[in-house]
Amino acid sequence: MSGEVSKPHLEAPDGPVSPSSRFYIERSADRLALEAIKRQGVTITIRAPYQMGKTSLLSRLVNKASKEGKKVATLNFQSFDKSSLTHASTFFRQFCIWLSDELNIEDQTEDFWKRSLGNVQLCTHYISRYIFKETQMPLLIAIDDVNAIIDADFRSDFFDMIRSWHNRRSVSKQWSKVDIILATSTEPSLLISDIPISPFNIGGTVVLDDFTPEQISELNDRHGSVLTRDREQQLITILGGHPYLVRQALYLIASGRMSTGDMSTHTIADDGPFRDHLHILLLRLHHQPELIEGFRQILQNQNCSVDVYYRLHSTDLVRREGLNMTPRNQLYVMFFARHLLS
């Protein structure tokens, strides 16, 4: 009909945002990482809590690396089964099998694992003496959810191995063409505290921040400007700039599944728009009484022990505002006060 304004095509915020999506909002961290991946022999750590856009940025970097002519192997440690995470020999061998599969080359681990060497040596030799010969080009090894091995006995060996690959670049032409990206939702110091063998204090670290008010306005415009500027400010007051929650709210409003009035009246209801996100966060506190007590102290007194604070901060539940410790947004204040203080 003449004069009728067409609605924008919407994408449900389920899972990572495609690099080509019109709903992908580029942050300053994106630009730094994209510039870095153009070079060869870089190590990048992406650090971001749950649903902050870590995997979306990783996908964008992988896409950029492919366009730069690099061979790419993308692994997600959440996909390892429990048996692999309890037996070092199984883990390191499956790591190499997975690399082979990602690079579309034949698995030769059976021959390599006949040798009487340690797991780190076997894994390193497999890459340097087999994978390099088969790929014959710059290589990116991108690992998402590397924090999945936080409870594994061999995690120090694995991170030491990654650090050694970084160090080999200075003496090996082959290793100088290998890029490594580690994406984690856990504070690196909780994964490995031994600084000399940590891969998280080398190369560049990308920390994903909240959306700015300007970025929220841009995302609102891409959803068809469903919020007035006053309503945008209300959204920011409730959600802060949490990327997933902001996009979820705009999608629900733009698709007609939530009214603007629901933002303040229905957000923490058991059938509310953010119920899944909130209940996953609540479940993460179960069986961790010290974290529950620490969060209670923050809700009541804006303070708790430093150690507990950093553990809560790694889950993105809290942040500092000056000298005070506070929940990261008003939504969390309302939800967790209801569940932890009642």
Image (spheres, helix red, strand yellow):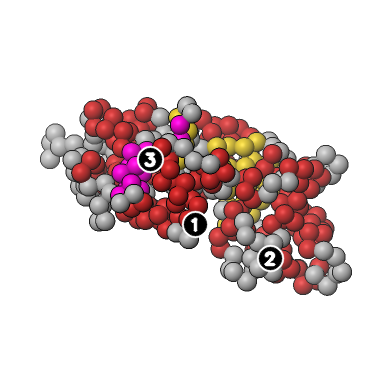
Residue at screen point 39% across, 44% down: 244
Q: Specify the amino acid type for callout 2.
A: Phe
Q: Earlier in the sequence, mark 2 or mark 3?
A: 2
Q: Nearer the viewer, residue 99 or 90?
A: 90
Residue at screen point 80% across, 43% down: 167
Q: Is residue 257 left or right of residue 103?
A: left
Label 3: which secondary element: helix
Query: Can I make out residue 73 in this image?
Result: yes
Q: Is residue 158 covered in magenta? A: no
Residue numbers of the magenta segment: 324-338
Q: Specify the amino acid type for callout 1.
A: Gln
CA gap, disc 1 and disc 3: 19 Å
- Rendered-image quadrant of the N terminus: top left
Q: Earlier in the sequence, mark 1 or mark 2?
A: 2
Q: Earlier in the sequence, mark 1 or mark 3?
A: 1
Q: Which residue is mark 2?
A: 91
Q: Specify the amino acid type for callout 3.
A: Gln
The percent coordinates of residue 11 (x first, y second) are 34, 48
Q: Dot 2, crowdedness within 10 Å: few (<14), some or many (≥20)?
A: many
Query: Can I make out residue 57 in this image?
Result: no
Task: Specify the principal SS of the magenta part.
Answer: helix
Residue 119 appears in which quarter of the rendering? bottom right
